[in-house]
Amino acid sequence: MDYFKKFLLSVFLISSLAHASIEQAPPSFNVVGKRAIWTDFTHAKYELSFDIKTRKAKSVAIIELNIFEKGYPIFDVVGTPTKVLVNGVSYSQQEIETPGKESKVRIIDHEFKAGRYKIQIESEVSNGVKFDASSVSAGFFMKDMRDREFLEMYIPSNYEYDQYKMEVSVRVTGSKKSHRLFTNGFLVEKSKNYFKYTYPDYFTSTSLYFHLAPEKKFKVLESVYETRLANGKDFPVTIYSRTKRLNRRIIKVVRKVLIELERDYGPWPHPHLIFYGDGKWKGGMEYAGAATAGWFAIGHELQHGYFARAVMPANGNAGWIDEAVASWRDFTVLHKIFPFRKDEINYTSMNLGNQSVFNRKTDHRSYVSGRSFMFYIDSLLKKVPGKSLKKFLKIYFENRKYTTIQSEDFRLDLEKYYGRSLKNLFDQYIYGRDIKNNSKLDGIHEKPFHEPLSHEVLQELI
Ligand SMILES: [Zn+2]
């Protein structure tokens, strides 16, 4: 490590202890004779423009980042960039595969040395946008069950380990109709068909909620959630859907769930809640202080406001934790009769959290199997007077909120609380130690809560 790299790393560690980043990145790797290196985004400014006449959506991303070793910097966006500038100089970029073909990313096709850079990436936003003759709708909806469907599906971003400050401005041109932007940020500026927002600095590539629509497309119900906690805070809640009736039904459930969650885990960790309800949709998806969901997934997605989008997975291998915890909660709240034993794990061995470090998606078995694992953990903890999984989660949440975590962080926190090693248990049931072929299923097929978002479903949601 050269002096400059050491210096940068120490400045970085001092300045952002709360926000883990490059130390949770996958390792650098060689591809087509080049050293692909991970970077630390510190700030990203996205300028988005939607032009009704040409039916084109464009993104200009200006990203400030640190590089800690010599190499070809990695970033990602699904749509091919039309222009990449580094400190004002134009470079080409290349789409590459990660070493085990787990995913695809892009590298800037030039070797840079350690240092701080400003990168400008111009690209077309082709996913999640729908034009008609007089207006546009755009929804940056995400999925964690499939690869490459976080923010990079729409605009340039990084792997989940990276937390960075975002700023988004949006301009709709060529339309007389007013548009509305539903987003989980702080409003800076607004005029007809122009919006500018900044976002909390704990955000990662799975945090941003972005839904632009013609003003009259949705019915909106604005209210304030009044906390029952002495250390809590009231916060604004925006519910929207196609009908006022659905909004009224949703707000009742949302309030009930928020009371439960605040009681169990402490104050709601985001400055607001934005909720897009869709009566027909069976699944849902969570964001930082925002969610979309069908009727039955409201509680599940709101609990993710704590576990998934306040304590955040640093990679695909940590994704199982939040689904296991949310499914455990769903079952405890919704079902009085349990079709399984709560004091034993209903599978022999599984690999939910020990796949490739380049994997970004959550294992789809994290719901049913992960839930069984959590019920078992709860039964273990309850053997110790005064302890339980819920009590542990409250402490874990308080200690880890606004940070990105890996599976081992969860295990170590749990062990500290329990007072005994859980290594064997994790090795067998979470890291798949007893499976000969790690990629094999353990005979259980699960239907994920966050069902894959097909192109048609996405188009309908927008
Ligand atoms: Zn979930």
Image (cartoon, helix red, strand yellow):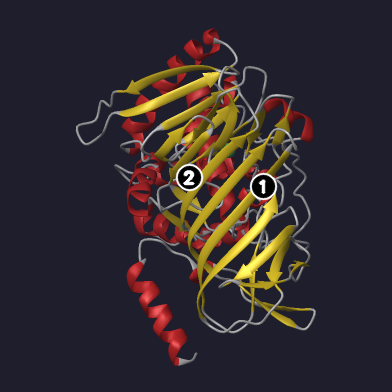
Residue that mark 2 sits on? 309
- Name the foreground residue: 201 vs 373: 201
Name the residue at 28% across, 27% down.
227
Helix, strand or loop at mark 1: strand
Write down which quadrant ligand 1 falls in: top right
- Judge from the rendering whether residue 205 lies leftward or rightward of residue 144; answer left or right: left
Number of marks present in the image shown: 2
Residue situated furthest left in the rendering: 230
Mark 2 or 1: in front is: 1
Q: Is residue 342 visible?
A: no
Q: Quadrant of residue 16?
A: bottom left
Rendered-image quadrant of the C terminus: top right
Q: Is residue 176 visible?
A: yes
Residue that mark 1 sits on? 58
Gap between marks 2 and 1 measured at Cα: 27 Å
The vertical placement of 50 against 228, above or below, is: below
Mark 1 residue crowding within 10 angstroms, few (<14) / some (14–19) / many (20+): some
- Judge from the rendering whether residue 452 lies leftward or rightward of residue 112; answer left or right: right
Q: Amino acid at mark 2?
A: Arg
Q: Position of residue 270 (x, y in %)?
A: 38, 39
Q: Amino acid at mark 1?
A: Lys
Q: Quadrant of residue 356?
A: bottom right
Q: What numbered label is drawn on residue 427? A: none
- Name the foreground residue: 33 vs 304: 33
Tag 1 or tag 2, which sits nearer the N-term? 1
Q: Quadrant of residue 177?
A: top right
Q: Position of residue 287 (x, y in %)?
A: 52, 40
Name the residue at 31% across, 36% down.
267
- Judge from the rendering whether residue 450 lies leftward or rightward of residue 43; answer left or right: right
Helix, strand or loop at mark 2: loop
